[in-house]
Amino acid sequence: MRIPRKLEHVHHALKLGQSGEQGFSDLKLIHNCLPETSLGRISLQTQIGELKLSSPIIVNAMTGGAQETEEINRELAIAARECGLAMAVGSQMSAIKNAEVSSSYQIVRQVNPNGIVFGNLGSEATLEQAERAVDMLQADALQIHLNVMQELIMPEGDRDFTGMLERISTIVERLHVPVIVKEVGFGMARESAAALLEAGVSTIDVGGYGGTNFAAIENARRNVQMDWLNDWGCKTTIALLEVIEAVKLMRVHTAPHKKLTVIGSGGVRGSLEACKALSLGASAVGIAGAFLHIQRTEGTDALINKMDDMHQELKLLMTALGAGTIEDLWNVPLVIRGETAEWCTARGIDIRSYASRTGLINIPAYSHTKVK
């Protein structure tokens, strides 16, 4: 009996792991020896569009659609509940087509009735399917994932991608919850981000290269591999800079008052990488593969400990940088080097502005009067 595709994806994701080539080693945060803050004053609260989150860390979309994946989603939901993290489920299209597997997604809301939960569908979804996906979970938002290269490599994948933007625009306009458009690990260029923003999308998850590699996963499922596509896409740091560039232009030219937000995901494994992604301008970071690996190999208690540790470590880093809030991190100076810098230079993205940020130099006033 053939293993369900959803379960195959989980098995291959755990086996292949993550490359760690997401580009964060190209970023160097500049030390602030006069931070003028304290750890007790640090706030991790953030916003994704109009959604208020108690943590900038999101358990990003992973799985669902098979009996075995229900257990995974249950355990991930327990950890998200205990640590106050928003959580997304994997694509719900299988449940829309086959109601018997709905419980593998609904378990997330059952376990975490008061938490923030994101539904998930592909760009082939209609408005009616989007509404059903949201209703299935009583979801607070809907992720629409973009996975063109995965589909092309997948033996049974889609081959027709016409009408994607129009369908997304319709869902954004008419769905009663916020819509997040995300890549699944191939990154996003500013041209695509600009088109999504023009279509009304207000939150983009960059889903860069360097985390779970769905090209490699689908190649592992093929009889004849196309492994020359395993490094397709752009690294997470590059995708973040590309999308943030599009967001900046949109704010300046057409939507200065609209709340446009970016989620950094793609190979984020720890607090330093999360801090760097946030410092580039992300409002939150999505983590999937690293959390899945901990839960499946060490258990749910270990995952909860990891999430708690990340919160404390992120507060420590923010204290050292003098950043009291997530938005303060957007003013932290950092140097962009290596392949990320080379890409940005070729693409005309100004990286010097990141290194010259001075918004957190806040030395308190004091008297120069000499004591007599």
Image (cartoon, rainbow, N blue to C red):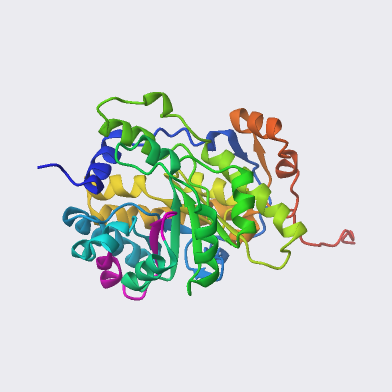
Quarter containing the C terminus: bottom right
Q: Position of residue 299 (x, y in %)?
A: 22, 52
Residue 368 or residue 125, whichever sits in front: 125
Q: Position of residue 136 (x, y in %)?
A: 31, 70
The residue at the point 32 percent across, 75 percent down is 113
Q: Where does residue 12 sit, x and y in percent of width and height?
A: 26, 38
Give the number of marks: 0
Asked if the magenta segment contains residue 117, the reply would be yes
Left or right of 281, for residue 159: left
User: What is the magenta range?
Assistant: 105-125
Q: Is residue 41 left or right of residue 225?
A: right
Q: Is residue 325 visible?
A: yes
Task: Find residue 275 and report its horizontal and vertical position in percent.
Answer: 54, 49
Q: Quadrant of the N terminus?
A: top left
Name the residue at 30% across, 34% down.
16
Looking at the image, the residue that sits furthest to the left is 1
The one of 323 and 214 positioned closer to us in this rendering: 214
Query: Which of 269/360 is in front?
Result: 269
254, above or below 249, in the image? below
**Residue 166 quadrant:** bottom right
Classify 244 as above or below 103: above
| In magenta segment, residue 251 | no
Residue 213 visible in rendering: no
Q: On the picture, is 235 further left or further right than 293?
A: right
